[in-house]
Image: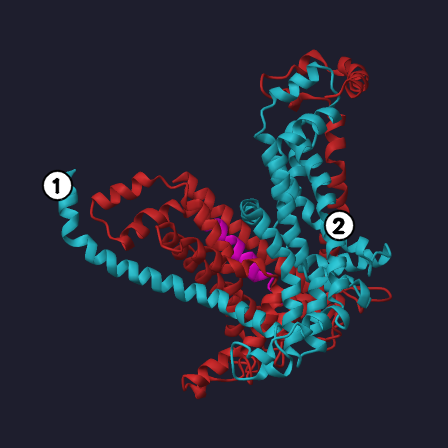
Chain colours: A cyan, B red
C-alpha cells in the first residue's frame, strides 16, 4: 500500500491540479450557457417594455417594474391559461393513474388468453411519434365533437400516455411480493379489494413518480393542445405562450413575463419534490 | 381492512372460488397468475379500450389514408403509392427529410457525448457540484415552446444577447440574423435542441454512474490509468446499455422535432428549416399545398414515413442489443 501511494505522489498531484482546473472551467462554461439565457429572460420580464431594448443587462433603478406581469395576466390571459392547464393536467394525471395502475396490475398478475400479444401490441406503440397520430386523431375528435374542449384534450392526453404508463406500472407491480395479496385472498378479499387495499398502497411511490412524469409531459405538451384548442379562452399555457409570441412580438417584457409565469408551476413542483421529480423525469428513459 | 368491506368482499370471492379448477393449481409465488381469466380482462379493459380507439385505430387509419388523396372533405380516392413516389419530386419534402436527418444526427451525437462526459465529470467531488448539476439540468424543466421562445429572443438580430455579445467583442461580421438565413437556421435550431435536452440526458447518465462499482475505478487508478483512460475503459463500457437508451431517445426526439421549429421559424425562411413533422403539419393544418396534391393524404403519407423511420431506429436498437447479448 505504502509503495503505491509513494509512487502516486510523484506525478499525480500536478496532473490533478490541471485536471481539476479544466473540470471547473468546463462545468462553469456549460452551467453559464444553460442558465444565463434564463437569467436574461427573468430580468427582462422585470423591466419596463422600452428598457428591454436598452444597453444595460441589469435594469437600472428606474426600470424595475412588475407591469409586464400584470399585463400578462390582464390583457394576455395567462391567468386563464394557468387555470386551463391545471384542469387538463389534473384530469390527465387522475385518469392515467387509474387506467394505468389497473392495466399494469392486470398484465402483471393475471393469466388470460391473449395477454402476451395484447401487451406486445401496446409496448410496440411506445415509440410512435405524436405527429403520426395527429391527423387521424384530429379527424376522430371532430366526429366525437371533442375538439376545442378541455375534456377532449385531457382525454387525448390520457389515451396517448396510457401505453407507457401501463408498461411502467406493470414493471412495478411485478416487483411486489405476491404473498401479501395471497394473504388477503385467504382472508376472503375480492380481487378488486386486493388491488385497492393491498397492491395499490404497496406501489404508492411508483404512482407518485408516474404522476410527476405525467404532470411534466401534460404541462409542457404543445402539439396536441395547439391543434385541438381553438377558442382563445380555452388555450392552455403552452399554446398561449406561442400566441403571445405572435401577438406581442415587440413587447419583450410581456413575452418574458408570460414565459416565466408558464414555468413557475414546474419550478415549484421541482423545489417541493426534488428527488421524486428527478425520478419522474428519468423514468421516461424507460421509453427506450 | 375494515370489517364491512371484508365481509362484502368475502361474498364476492366465495362465489368465485369454486370456478378455479384443480388443473389450474398455481405454482408457488405466482398465485395470482392463475386467477380466473375474466378478472384479468376487467383490469386491462380501460387501458385496452383507450389504446384501440385512440392509438390502434389512428395508426391503421393513417396507413390507409396515406394511400389516398383527400382534400379534407368529400370522398377520398385510392391512389396506391402515388403519395410516396410524389415525395421525392417535392423539393420541400426533400429539404424536410434532410433537415430532420441532420437535426437528429447532430443532436444525438453531440448531446449523448456531452451528457456522458458531463455526468462523468460531475460524479467526481467538486465544490458547488450540486449547483453545477442543477444549473445544467434546469433547461430540461422547460417546455420546448418556452425554449424556442427564449432562443428566438437570443437570436434576434437587433437586441438579442447573442449578437449584442458578438458586437461587443468586435465580431461584427458574424453577428447576423441567425434565423432568417437559410445557411444558419438549421444549425441554430440544433443548438436549441441540444441546450434543452442536455440536462435530461446528463441526469440519466448520472443516475447510471451510481451503479458502477467504485472498485473498478480504484483498480484502474492502481494500474496508473489517467482520468481520460478511466473514462474510456471503465465509464464508457459500463454505461453501454444506458447509452443505447439515451441514443434511442435522442433519435426518436430528433425524428419528431416539431415545437422548436414551429415556434422559432415556422419552417422558414422559405421552407429552409422545415422538418418532416412541421411540413406535414403545415400541409394538414396550415393550408400549405404541395404542388397539385391535396393535403391530407399526402401529409399522412409523410407521417407514415416518420413512423417507418421510428420503427427502423427501434429495430436497429433491438438488433444491436440482441447481438451484444449473444457475444
- Chain letter for the residue marked with disc 1 in the picture: A
Which residue is found at the position 41% from the left and 87% from the top?
Answer: B170
Residue B49 picture location, percent across and down: 77, 42
**CA separation in Å, label 2 and label 1:** 68 Å
Q: Quadrant of the C terminus of chain B?
A: top left
Mark 1 element type: helix
Which residue is found at the position 81% from the left and 65% from the top?
Answer: A233
Mark 2 element type: helix
On screen, A191 above or below B185?
A: above
Q: Quadrant of residue B270?
A: bottom right
In the image, A139 versus A195, the foreground residue is: A195
| Residues tagged 2 and 1 counted as in contact (Cβ below 8 A) | no
Q: Quadrant of residue A129?
A: bottom right
* Circle 1 residues within 10 Å: few <14, some 14–19, many ≥20: few
Residue that protrudes farthest toward the front in the picture: A61
Q: In the image, is residue A188 part of the stretch drawn in magenta?
A: no
Q: Quadrant of residue B85?
A: bottom right
On screen, A44 above or below B321?
A: below
Q: Which mark is residue A3?
A: 1
Tell me which segment is drawn in magenta: B243-259
Q: Which residue is mark 2?
A: B54
Q: Is residue B65 visible?
A: no
Residue A99 picture location, percent across and down: 73, 40
* Circle 2 residues within 10 Å: few <14, some 14–19, many ≥20: many
Amino acid at each position: 500500500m505504502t509503495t503505491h501511494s509513494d509512487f502516486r505522489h510523484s506525478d499525480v498531484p500536478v496532473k490533478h491540479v490541471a485536471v481539476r482546473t479544466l473540470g471547473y472551467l468546463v462545468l462553469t462554461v456549460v452551467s453559464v450557457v444553460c442558465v444565463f439565457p434564463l437569467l436574461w429572460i427573468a430580468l427582462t420580464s422585470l423591466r419596463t417594455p422600452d428598457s428591454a431594448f436598452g444597453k444595460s443587462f441589469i435594469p437600472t433603478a428606474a426600470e424595475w417594474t412588475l407591469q409586464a406581469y400584470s399585463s400578462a395576466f390582464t390583457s394576455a390571459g395567462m391567468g386563464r391559461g394557468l387555470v386551463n392547464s391545471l384542469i387538463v393536467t389534473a384530469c390527465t394525471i387522475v385518469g392515467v393513474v387509474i387506467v394505468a395502475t389497473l392495466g399494469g396490475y392486470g398484465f402483471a398478475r393475471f393469466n388470460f388468453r391473449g395477454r402476451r400479444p395484447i401487451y406486445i401490441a401496446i409496448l410496440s406503440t411506445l415509440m410512435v411519434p405524436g405527429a403520426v397520430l395527429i391527423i387521424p386523431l384530429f379527424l376522430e375528435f371532430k366526429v366525437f365533437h371533442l375538439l376545442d374542449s378541455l375534456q377532449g384534450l385531457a382525454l387525448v392526453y390520457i389515451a396517448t400516455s396510457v401505453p407507457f404508463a401501463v408498461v411502467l406500472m406493470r414493471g412495478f407491480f411485478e416487483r411486489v411480493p405476491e404473498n401479501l395479496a395471497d394473504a388477503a385472498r385467504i382472508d376472503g378479499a375480492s380481487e378488486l379489494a386486493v388491488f385497492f387495499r393491498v397492491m395499490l398502497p404497496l406501489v404508492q411511490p411508483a404512482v407518485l413518480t408516474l404522476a410527476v412524469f405525467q404532470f411534466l409531459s401534460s404541462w409542457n405538451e404543445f402539439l396536441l393542445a395547439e391543434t385541438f384548442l381553438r377558442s382563445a379562452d380555452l388555450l392552455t399555457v403552452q399554446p398561449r405562450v406561442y400566441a403571445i409570441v405572435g401577438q406581442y412580438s415587440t413587447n419583450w417584457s410581456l413575452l418574458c413575463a408570460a414565459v416565466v409565469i408558464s414555468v413557475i408551476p414546474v419550478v415549484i413542483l421541482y423545489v417541493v419534490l426534488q428527488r421524486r421529480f428527478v425520478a419522474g423525469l428519468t423514468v421516461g428513459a424507460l421509453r427506450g | 381492512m375494515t370489517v364491512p368491506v371484508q365481509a362484502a368482499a368475502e361474498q364476492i370471492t366465495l362465489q368465485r372460488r369454486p370456478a378455479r379448477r384443480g388443473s389450474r393449481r398455481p405454482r408457488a409465488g405466482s398465485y395470482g397468475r392463475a386467477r380466473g381469466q375474466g378478472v384479468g380482462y376487467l383490469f386491462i379493459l380501460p387501458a385496452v379500450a383507450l389504446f384501440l380507439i385512440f392509438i390502434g385505430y389512428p395508426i391503421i387509419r393513417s396507413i390507409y389514408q396515406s394511400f389516398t388523396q383527400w382534400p379534407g372533405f368529400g370522398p377520398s380516392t385510392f391512389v396506391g403509392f402515388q403519395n410516396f413516389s410524389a415525395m421525392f419530386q417535392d423539393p420541400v419534402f426533400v429539404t424536410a427529410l434532410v433537415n430532420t436527418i441532420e437535426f437528429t444526427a447532430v443532436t444525438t451525437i453531440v448531446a449523448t457525448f456531452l451528457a456522458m462526459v458531463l455526468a462523468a465529470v460531475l460524479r467526481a467531488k467538486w465544490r458547488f457540484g450540486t449547483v453545477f448539476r442543477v444549473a445544467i439540468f434546469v433547461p430540461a424543466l422547460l417546455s420546448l415552446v418556452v425554449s424556442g421562445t427564449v432562443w428566438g429572443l437570443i437570436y434576434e438580430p437587433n437586441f438579442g444577447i447573442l449578437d449584442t455579445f458578438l458586437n461587443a467583442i468586435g465580431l461584427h461580421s458574424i453577428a447576423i440574423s441567425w434565423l432568417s438565413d437559410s445557411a444558419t437556421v438549421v444549425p441554430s435550431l440544433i443548438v436549441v435542441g441540444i441546450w434543452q435536452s442536455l440536462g435530461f440526458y446528463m441526469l440519466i447518465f448520472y443516475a447510471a454512474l451510481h451503479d458502477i462499482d467504485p472498485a473498478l475505478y480504484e483498480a484502474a487508478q492502481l494500474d496508473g490509468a489517467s482520468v481520460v483512460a478511466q473514462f474510456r475503459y471503465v465509464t464508457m463500457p459500463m454505461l453501454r446499455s444506458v447509452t443505447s437508451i439515451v441514443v434511442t431517445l435522442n433519435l426518436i426526439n430528433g425524428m419528431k422535432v416539431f415545437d422548436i421549429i414551429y415556434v422559432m421559424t415556422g419552417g422558414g425562411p422559405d421552407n429552409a428549416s422545415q422538418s418532416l413533422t412541421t411540413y406535414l403539419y403545415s400541409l394538414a393544418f396550415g393550408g400549405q399545398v404541395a404542388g397539385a396534391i391535396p393535403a391530407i393524404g399526402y401529409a399522412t403519407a409523410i407521417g407514415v414515413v416518420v413512423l417507418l423511420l421510428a420503427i427502423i431506429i427501434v429495430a436497429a436498437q433491438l438488433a444491436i442489443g440482441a447481438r451484444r447479448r449473444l457475444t
